[in-house]
Image (spheres, rainbow, N blue to C red):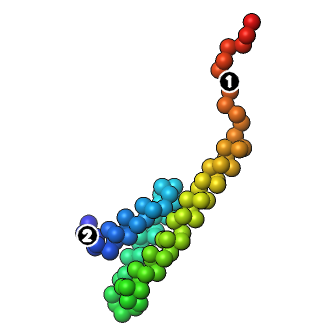
């Protein structure tokens, strides 16, 4: 396995700003996309500075929104689930 660049390691660290559920579903694909964009930038595409600027802005916008979506989904599920049974002994 090839050693990852500092760009990839930093991007992986930034992905930790997303909720774990989101990273589990999309983290590898996002890292692959970033790796390809970085290769394109190195081959004469957008500059690395522009790539990092876009990436930082995107993560800064997307990560809080994903946390909000996860917490909203959890709240919705908790309202739909039946109440926990009471384990108190009945009075005689």
Decide which of 62, 81 is in the foreground and name it. Answer: 62
- CA distance separating discs 1 and 2: 56 Å
Residue 65, given in percent of the width and then of the height, sits at 58, 65
- Secondary element under disc 1, as helix, strand or loop, is loop
- Mark closer to the chain start, 1 or 2: 2
Residue 9 is left or right of residue 60, and the answer is left
Image quarter where the N terminus lies is: bottom left
Q: Which mark is residue 86?
A: 1
Any part of residue 40 in sight = no
Q: Is residue 28 above or below residue 54?
A: above
Q: Which mark is residue 14?
A: none
> Furthest-top residue in view?
92
Residue 67 is left or right of residue 78, and the answer is left
Residue 17, by quadrant, is: bottom left
How many numbered markers are drawn? 2
Residue 38, given in percent of the width and then of the height, sits at 37, 81
Q: Label 2 belongs to which residue?
A: 2
What residue is at 59 percent from the left and 56 percent from the top? 70
């Amino acid at each position: 396995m090839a050693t990852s660049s500092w760009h990839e390691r930093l991007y992986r660290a930034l992905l930790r700003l997303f909720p774990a559920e989101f990273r589990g579903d999309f983290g590898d694909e996002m890292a692959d996309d970033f790796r390809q964009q970085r290769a394109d930038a190195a081959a004469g595409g957008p500059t690395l500075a522009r790539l990092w600027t876009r990436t930082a802005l995107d993560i800064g916008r997307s990560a809080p929104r994903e946390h909000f979506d996860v917490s909203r989904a959890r709240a919705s599920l908790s309202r739909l689930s039946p109440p926990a049974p009471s384990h108190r002994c009945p009075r005689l």
